[in-house]
Image: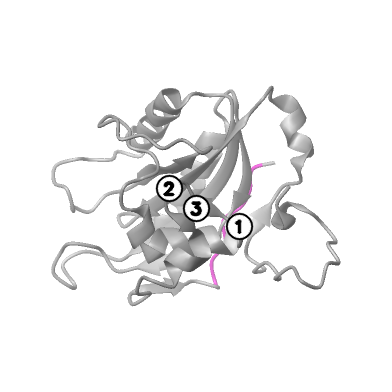
Amino acid sequence: MTAFFTEGHSDPTVQPVPASVVAKVDAADTTLQNPKRAVIALGSNLGNRLETLQGAIDALEDTPGLRIKAVSPVYETEPWGVEPGSQPSYFNAVVVLKTTLPPSSLLERAHAVEEAFNRVRDERWGPRTLDVDIVAYADVVTDDPHLTLPHPRAHERAFVLAPWHDVEPEAQLPGRGAVAALLDTVTRDGVEPRKDLELRLPE
């Protein structure tokens, strides 16, 4: 079990978890049979961004066969692939979950949550109410064009790696290595922690 799921951990070698990380103990796993661990990245740059991210977390938790284990701090991020100032900034976060859903069903649920928040897919780097991206699923590595795992650009994105590292300092991105090491190779320019904001873990 990863240290951040444990309350009252006294090992002095374990790095402290940021106060805005919200996590459940593993007792909730008793509600699932043989669950797999997955990591999902959330992003929003239209409308009430924080409310949208919280709504996505709540909708994921309401999914049968899925339990959210931890929610990262919120980061504010400049949009990728567009002219500076041409779009609002994003709020980004990462959730760690356990699920009995196969990757394909988890993807379907991610798309359904996006659609519930009126996600529009008119352009690749266009603004959007909500992004729900599967970053990793267990140790699966696949280049299936329908769902590439892990996410093909996760290792390049500080707005994914930074919140994930906050939640799981020892995390590994399958096929790429330690998240901490990957984070050291990317720029954090335009990716700022929002310590004044916090997302709730559904009860």
Out of 12 and 159, give the one closest to the viewer.
12
Answer left or right for 148 relative to 12.
left
Q: Is residue 188 visible?
A: yes
**x then y, percent, for residue 8:** 85, 61
Magenta-colored span: 196-202
Of badges 2 and 3, the one in the foreground is 2
- Which sits earlier in the primary sequence, circle 2 or circle 3? 3
Q: Amino acid at mark 1?
A: Glu
Give me the C-alpha separation between circle 1 and circle 2. Answer: 17 Å
Does 114 lie within the magenta span? no
**x then y, percent, for residue 130:** 34, 46
Q: Which mark is residue 175?
A: 2
Quadrant of the rendered image containing residue 11: bottom right
- Which sits earlier in the primary sequence, circle 1 or circle 2? 1
- Which sits earlier in the primary sequence, circle 1 or circle 3? 3
In which quadrant is the C terminus drawn? top right
Give me the C-alpha separation between circle 2 and circle 3. Answer: 19 Å
Residue at 43 percent across and 64 percent down: it is 182
Residue designated by label 1: 168
Residue designated by label 3: 94
- Callout 3 secondary element: strand
Of badges 1 and 2, the one in the foreground is 2
Out of 50 and 27, give the one closest to the viewer.
27
Out of 181 and 34, give the one closest to the viewer.
181
Q: Amino acid at mark 3?
A: Val
Give me the C-alpha separation between circle 1 and circle 3. Answer: 10 Å
